[in-house]
Image (tube, rainbow, N blue to C red):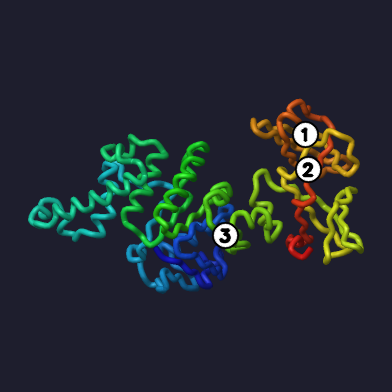
Amino acid sequence: MAGIELKGISKSFEKNEVIKSLNLMIENGEFITIVGPSGCGKSTLLRIIAGLESQSNGDVIIDGREVNNIKASNRDLAMVFQSYALYPHLTVLQNLMVPLKLRRMSTLERFPIINWFFPNRRSKIDKLKESVLQASETLQIEHLLGRKPGQLSGGQQQRVAVGRAMVREPVAFLMDEPLSNLDAALRVHMRAEISELHRKLKTTFVYVTHDQAEALTMSDRMAVMMDGEILQLDTPSEIYNKPASLRVAEFIGSPKINVLPAESNEKGDIDCMGISMSLSIKDNKNEKILVGIRPEHTNLLQDNKKNCFLGEVNHKENLGSDIYLHVTLKDSQQKMIIRSNPDISFNTKIGEIIRIGFDNNKVMIFNESGQNLNKKS
């Protein structure tokens, strides 16, 4: 396994700059996820690490060695793509053998008929099969070795694709949206499997996805990437609870964070749409600001508390364990999404006026340019 360092990486396609002087240090054995919306440059960045794409400027350093001029096949990396790219005419065993034969056997040893004249060929094949069986046991696909890809489910094909990368014993795994073709339930299952595999192998994983749930549940650290730049690099917990900017806060979290207009007075006390909040800021006094409240930090009130938002229910989503209420706040066109316990909100009707409370300790404060002010408070 090896660490990966990116220094001043930029990439342009003609006049379109898709990656902007990006720096990133990936620790040895770390599971890091690069997450961002479609078109932000994350897959291009992964291809640059792999050597499948050349950067316009900057250096790629793997295990302390600069690899700018080293082709992909010699970087000792294994890549798992969105499409599993399995050979449809080969069995699972044969698919898993392909990368080993290419790396450990000469061209003549792989050539039909001629290969029988090499006395050590059989012992090499036996060793390759042994490596394949070990990987198969780890991934629990031994019973699939005789099948062809067309006879496998999506999850089974995904495990075979990971196994084909795994038998190479690379210094790092690069994964480009490997779960995007699976249904929702299977994605949840495979997230756990890939995380467990990382713990077993203790190898560096670089994982690219647009799915924030994958980034939050699988990573040691995650890099939030937008418009060719990394906006924040930290642990999932830190990014979720202390986003550096409003852009990060709005991207991470589902449903999306509620953002409400507010203002601070000369003392730094905050008023949000007529509601006095039990918090204040040291800087940015007498200014217009923005308040962020995640849906899970709101609640449906059943008493007549004065210090709460009033809103009309426009839409109701019953997810079983939670009910999400889409609300328009009274005397404004401001929208909010409220998460509520079904026991409390099951009988809430469309058009009903409800009282909305919130957790003051979880409120995020941003200036008009989107910078998080909580850290200054």
Disc 2 and disc 1: Cα gap in Å?
Answer: 9 Å
Report which residue position mark 2 lands on: 335
Q: Secondary structure at mark 2?
A: strand
First-in-chain label (2 vs 3): 3
Which image quadrant for residue 318?
Answer: top right
Residue 93, horizontal then vertical, whole percent: 26, 44
Report which residue position mark 3 lands on: 223
Residue 100, horizontal then vertical, whole percent: 26, 55
Mark 2–mark 1 CB contact (< 8 Å): yes
Q: Is residue 68 visible?
A: no
Q: Amino acid at mark 3?
A: Ala
145 on left or right of 344: left
What residue is drawn where x is 25% and y is 57%?
A: 102
- Label at residue 314: 1
165 on left or right of 300: left
First-in-chain label (3 vs 1): 3
**Quadrant where the C terminus is found in the figure:** bottom right
Q: Is residue 291 visible?
A: yes
Q: Nearer the viewer's eye, disc 2 or disc 3?
A: 3
Mark 3–mark 1 CB contact (< 8 Å): no
Q: Amino acid at mark 2?
A: Lys
**Quadrant where the N terminus is found in the figure:** bottom left
Q: 10 Å neighbourhood of mark 1: few (<14), some, or many (≥20)?
A: some
Q: Amino acid at mark 1?
A: Asn
Considering every residue shown, the one lying at the far top of the view is 347
Q: Secondary structure at mark 3?
A: strand
